[in-house]
Image (cartoon, rainbow, N blue to C red):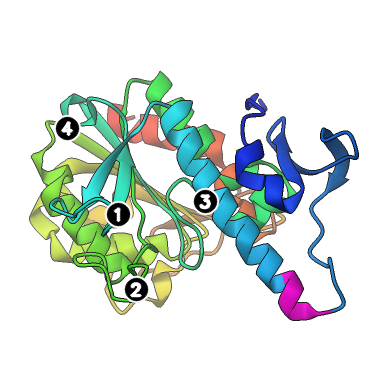
Amino acid sequence: MTQTYHNVCLSYFVNLSLKISEGQLRKLGPDGQPSDEPFQFNISDEHHECQAHYEELGNAITNYIYHLLEAELSLIRLPVPIDAKPGAGTFIFASKSYDHKDILMILINGSGAVRAGQWARSLIINESLDKGTQIPYIRRAIAKDYGVMILNTNDNYEVNGKKIKNSSNAEEHAHYVWETYVAKTKSSSIVIVAHSYGGVVTVTLADQLKTEFERRIKAIVFTDSVHAFSPIKMPKFMKEISRNWISSSEPLDTPMKTPEFDCHRVSAGHPKHEMSSCACIDSAFKFIEEKLTGN
């Protein structure tokens, strides 16, 4: 079901003559109201101008998603590193009382320009917030009384170009967040949803924290994960609690050819890589519930 988003983002997009309307990015009409015209990349014959416009839009989207996470979902920011001064370092998001919930869901996006709360920037721009952001997963998890934590694995550099301490790359970021925040929670059951390169981050974390991972992780949802390209071998226990919904034109949950070294692969019900998380959300939560209840 499509969520309703308040049209409060004019300050984020006004310089680009764009606005979010009902979860979709639209150009502003002459009256200053959202039209039916979507974003257009080609605003000039000069490619560098088009690219600069796109990057400016990307930054506006990042800030707007952060705004939604805090204003509409009541998430809080946790600093990385924990002693980072204001304006320095990076941060993750978590639901209130996340550390006291029995079940904690951790969301890990892929590589590239996406930041916390985003699955795919292209979907946010060309489709909708529901398809391109992690918000539907967050809403559903909170409704189930899970704690929620959203990693920010791609935020690795300070404004001055220096690498962020404890977040110089995705793997270091995830390990630091686990040791600093996750390890101290009271959650007896932790579930992970990891998209694309987020799968590599997950298997790396599992290799670094073998005992604790096996004890506390109850389910892992991979969405078109590329962890198979990691040199780290997936342990047996991880295969048993994981499933990878891969991009495919086959109907949702259709069993797919799975190498012996990997967890079970099924169709995400959509041929596009970036759509996998959105397309399989119902099946993903069903799988998680089955693993949590032992069915």
Q: Quadrant of the N terminus?
A: top right
Is disc 2 placed on a helix, strand or loop?
A: loop
Q: What secondary structure is found at the residue carrying circle 4?
A: loop
Q: Alpha-carbon neighbours of circle 2 within 10 Å: few (<14), some, or many (≥20)?
A: few
| Lower position in the chain sequence, tag 1 or tag 3 | 3
Determine contact: label 4, label 3, CB under 8 Å: no
| Disc nearer the start of the sequence (1/4) | 1
Magenta range: 46-50
Q: Main secondary structure of the magenta part?
A: helix
Label 2, on which residue?
160
Of labels 4 and 2, earlier in sequence is: 2
The disc placed on residue 225 is none
User: How many tags in the picture?
Assistant: 4
At which x and y percent is residue 70? 41, 32
Q: To which residue does mark 3 refer?
A: 62
* Callout 3: SS: helix
Question: Is 45 left, or right, of 218 in this rendering?
Answer: right
